[in-house]
Amino acid sequence: MRLEILPVLGIGDVTEGDDLAALIATAAPWLRDGDVLVVTSKIVSKAEGRLVDVPADGPERLAARDEALAAETARVVATRGATRIVQTHHGFVMASAGIDASNVDKTRLVLLPQDPDASARALRAALRERYDLDVAVIVTDTMGRPWRNGLTDVALGVAGMPAIRDHRGEVDPYGNELQLTQMAVVDELAGAGELIKGKCDQVPVAVVRGYLTATAPDDGVGARALVRDAELDLFSLGTAEARAAGLAAAATLSDGPGEAPADPAAVARAIAAVAGVVAPGTAFTPVTDAEVRAALVATVPGWPQRATVLVLGQPPTPVDPAGLVRLGADLQRLRTALAAEGVPSALLPPPPGSTAAACLAL
C-alpha cells in the first residue's frame, strides 16, 4: 500500500450557510473516486451554524462558556481546577465537550456538529450527486488520550467506509488466531490528515489517497461504532469522582447478605482491593468455618442464618476512639468493594469472645 496525504488549499474562511461540497470541489478539482476526505469539524460546525455568541472577555465570557458547556454535557467524567472532562451527547469523552475558541471571532465559540455522522453523510452525498465523486468522508476533531501527553485528531463522523477494521479470526504469520484486534482506522486516517492540516495554516481539509480501493456501497454505521459501551468502560470516571461515587453508593448499600452463598474468592479480591487505602493496622479476616457460623446464629441476636462467610474487622492497637472511627470508615470501604464484586453484606456486632471490633456477615 502506498499512501498520499494531500492538502486542499484555498478554501478560506467558512461562515454559516456556506456550501462545503462546492468549496471543496472548487478547491480540489483533482479529487478522485476512492479518496478519503478528512474534514475538520470546525468548518462543518461553522457551515451548520453551530456557534454561540459570547462576550469577548471578562467573567461574563467565562459564564457564557460554562453555560454552553453544561448544555453540551451528558455527564461529567472528571474535574480538576478549570479543566472539565465530560461525555458529550454524542458519547465522546473529551475536554470541554469539544467547545473551541480558536480560528473563530473572539465573540463566538464553536460547538461540535450536532450529528457528525449525518454531516459526513450529507457531504458525501452532495459530492456524489453534484460532482459525480465517490469518496469517503471523515469529520475530525482534536482530543487528548488517557495516560498520554499531546493531542491528536480523531474521527467524530464517517461515511463511505467502516470506522473499524476488524482482524478478529484472522491468523498471523506465526499461526496465531487474532482474538481482540480491532483497528480504529478512521482515527488513524484522521491523524494522518492532521499532519498536513496543522492548527494555524488554515488548511481544514486533507485527502488521503491510496488507502481505499473503493468506497463502501453504503454510508455504514458511522463513528458511533467507536464509542465504547458504558458497561465495558473500566475507566468511566476520574479517580476523585469514582471515589465520591463509591462513598455515595456505600451510604445506600443493602443491609444483609445475599440469597446465594458468598464466593470466598470474591471476598478475598475485595479485601485486597482496599488493602492499600485502609488505616495502617486495620485488618480484615474472612471466616468460612461452618461451626463458627452456627455458634453465631445461636448466640448473636439478629445474626442472619443464610450468611455463609463473615469478615472480622480489627482496628489498630492500642484501640482508641479515633481508631474505631477509622475502622468504621474502612468497613464502609470494604462493603463498597464487596458490592462491586456482587457480594452484599450486613454489619453486625463481633462474635462473643472475639478480639474483633466489628463483623460483616456475607
Image: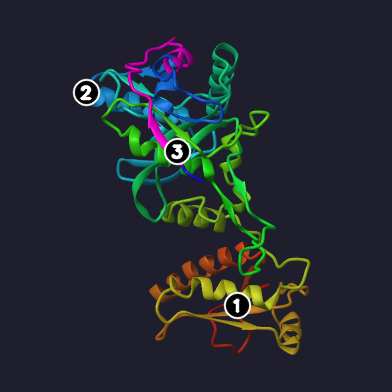
| Of 114 and 218, the residue lying toward us | 218
User: Which amino acid type is shown beneath numbered disc 3?
Assistant: Ala
Query: Does 70 lie within the magenta span?
Result: no
State how far apart marks 2 and 1 are (Cα).
55 Å
Can you tell which quarter of the image residue 127 is in?
Answer: top right
Q: Which mark is residue 268?
A: 1
Q: Is residue 342 left or right of residue 108?
A: right
Query: Does 7 lie within the magenta span?
Result: yes
Secondary structure under badge 2?
Answer: loop
Q: Eyeballing the image, is 145 above or below 126?
A: below
Residue drawn at x 56%, y 11% as measured from the top left: 130
Q: Eyeballing the image, is 336 above or below 303?
A: above
Mark toward the viewer: 1 or 3: 3
Q: Eyeballing the image, is 85 above or below 117?
A: below
What is the crowding at mark 2: few (fewer than 14 residues within 10 Å), some, or many (at least 20)?
Answer: few
Q: Which mark is residue 57?
A: 2
Quadrant containing the C terminus is: bottom right
Secondary structure under badge 1?
Answer: helix
Residue 143 seen in render: yes
Point out the stretch of residues depicted in magenta: 3-25
Secondary structure under badge 3?
Answer: helix
| Of 344 and 215, the residue lying toward us | 215
What is the crowding at mark 1: few (fewer than 14 residues within 10 Å), some, or many (at least 20)?
Answer: some
User: Which amino acid type is shown beneath numbered disc 2?
Assistant: Asp
